[in-house]
Image: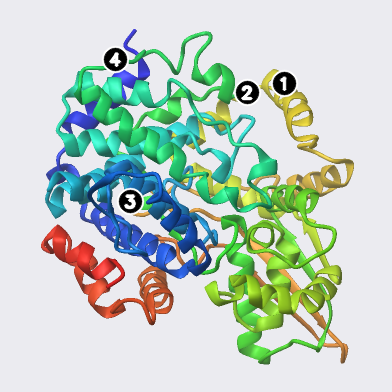
Amino acid sequence: MKAHLATLGEWVAGVRIADLPPATLQAARYQILDMIAAAHGARQAVPAARAVADFAGPGRATVLVTGAKLGPADAALANCACSMAEDFDDIVWMGHTCHSAVFAPLAVAEHEGRSSEELLLAVVVANEIGGRLGASCFLGPLNGQMWTFIHLAGAAAGAAKLLGLDAARTTHALAISLAQPNFALQPGFMAPTSKLLSAGTPTATGIQAAYFARAGMTGAADILEDRRGFWRRFSFLPLPGMLGGLGSLWVTETLTVKSYPGCHFFQTAGAAVDAILARTGRLDGRVAAVRVETTKLGMEVTRFARGYAPADGPVTPVNSNFDLATTVAIHLHAGRLGSAEMDPAWLAAATPALRALAARTRVEHDPALTARVLEGSRAVAAGRNALSSLGPRDLVRLIAKYRDEYRSSLLTPRELGGWLKLAAGRVGRKPPPAPTAGAIPLYFPNRVTVELNDGGRETETVDLPPGSFAAPTCGAVVTAKVLQETAGRLDGKRLLEAALALPATPLADLVSSARKP
């Protein structure tokens, strides 16, 4: 049986830009713009980007926020540190592939003198490989942004494509990148600024792996499935079927651009708050209580964040990104939620008001909202097949594993009542049909209810993030974000024109419009 990485390596080496649908290319353009905006918006991350130059060697790849020219691995590391700082990135199904998918190809393409067309293709390749690897480990000890290992494979795939490696050497690049995979630990991710390195460190390793493969180094093609290999350590129940669909399912088209800094699971809560504020105007000082109903994922992320929240001292950008109550409190207090509200000085000054408002905010799991997430997975054949393949023994095993790893229960007695009520209401109902073509929406709903001091109440539910590539608002979200986050640093309109015209725009022109003057 052919090793899984060999199949991936063959596809990476063989795919051409003519094979990519127009929608996939447009999603890649949006993602490039989004990550440039995220990097420039994180002002507090600039010292970390400068620090890379203290140990890095010279090269031809650009650090966007400083203009420094470094080798490709080091430039990508610095750019990823900036884009990770405020959690203002984007996602695909499944994973935050964006850091490695954009900044590894950008660095290697610039360093190697490749074309804009080759860059665009490499961005898609990195998304397709990184997203699939994350999906194969969906049922495992890590999730979400803590799947930092996806940047190993994504960066290796994108770099291998730009280096022109054949199928065998591309397979070796992937295998080398996964030989010593990163395993993210929550203490270093949920509160301190070491989080900034979560994507950059594996991205740099993935780029290096492609260069080593070009030089003749070899890796274990069966490293995923070997009995002592990757899946044995990174998955409770491996889902190898998630690696399929290359050339038919374009993971890049599942893109969701964040409208608000913070966890992806919270994006619709931000949209709900904005909808309420559009009706009421600023509410700070008029809020008696807030109730946020969220998915199981949103609930668990909040629980983890609260476990690492500082008992005293100021609210921090890192920790607030993962606590739904604090995220909503910042939004209501400021009347908006953008990179300005992630400024440490602003957060420190606002901390007393934010803590008081967060204390009046109750976050609860609504099984009906989680069911919406699961229904959305039907749009992806691999996800649909994976869910249907789970039997009772698998579920029992997973419950035990999650309890041991996360000190978490997949099903509490309170949630059981909600699930039973939901199931009773759906008896006889047909499941929603899966889309057959086009962008795939990733639903992560939230419901926000604000109770006012005068007895009034405002409620809003949002299912699909405004930045979903499947939503008609995606282009507007990208445009607004670029103009907002690059203001005072770049000519945002010029950047938009350059990126949206890819591959017609020369790579040098794209970089010059994206870097600090």
Determine the image quadrant of residue 234: top right
Q: Which mark is first along the chain, 1 or 3?
A: 3
**What residue is shown with label 1?**
397
Do residues under tags 4 and 3 come within 8 Å of each other at their CB atoms? no
Disc number lying in front (1 or 4): 4
Q: Quadrant of the N terminus?
A: top left
The kind of residue on which mark 1 rests is Arg
**What residue is shown with label 2?**
236
Labelled disc at residue 102: 3
Q: Which mark is first along the chain, 4 or 2?
A: 4
In the image, 454 versus 98, the foreground residue is 98
Q: Which mark is first along the chain, 3 or 2?
A: 3
The kind of residue on which mark 4 rests is Thr
Do residues under tags 2 and 1 come within 8 Å of each other at their CB atoms? yes
Disc number lying in front (4 or 3): 4
Question: Cα distance, mark 1 to mark 4?
Answer: 36 Å
Q: Residues within 10 Å of mark 4 (few under 14, many from 20)?
A: some
The kind of residue on which mark 2 rests is Phe
Do residues under tags 1 and 4 come within 8 Å of each other at their CB atoms? no
Question: Cα distance, mark 2 to mark 1?
Answer: 8 Å
Badge 4 element: loop
Do residues under tags 2 and 3 come within 8 Å of each other at their CB atoms? no
Badge 3 element: helix
Q: Residues within 10 Å of mark 1 (few under 14, many from 20)?
A: few
Q: What residue appears at the point 39 percent right and 33 percent down from the top-left corner? A: 205
The kind of residue on which mark 3 rests is Val
The answer to whether residue 282 is left or right of residue 286 is left
Residue 225 in picture, x, y percent from top left: 46, 14
Determine the image quadrant of residue 32: bottom left
Question: Cα distance, mark 4 to mark 3?
Answer: 26 Å
**What residue is shown with label 4?**
218
Q: Which mark is first along the chain, 1 or 2?
A: 2
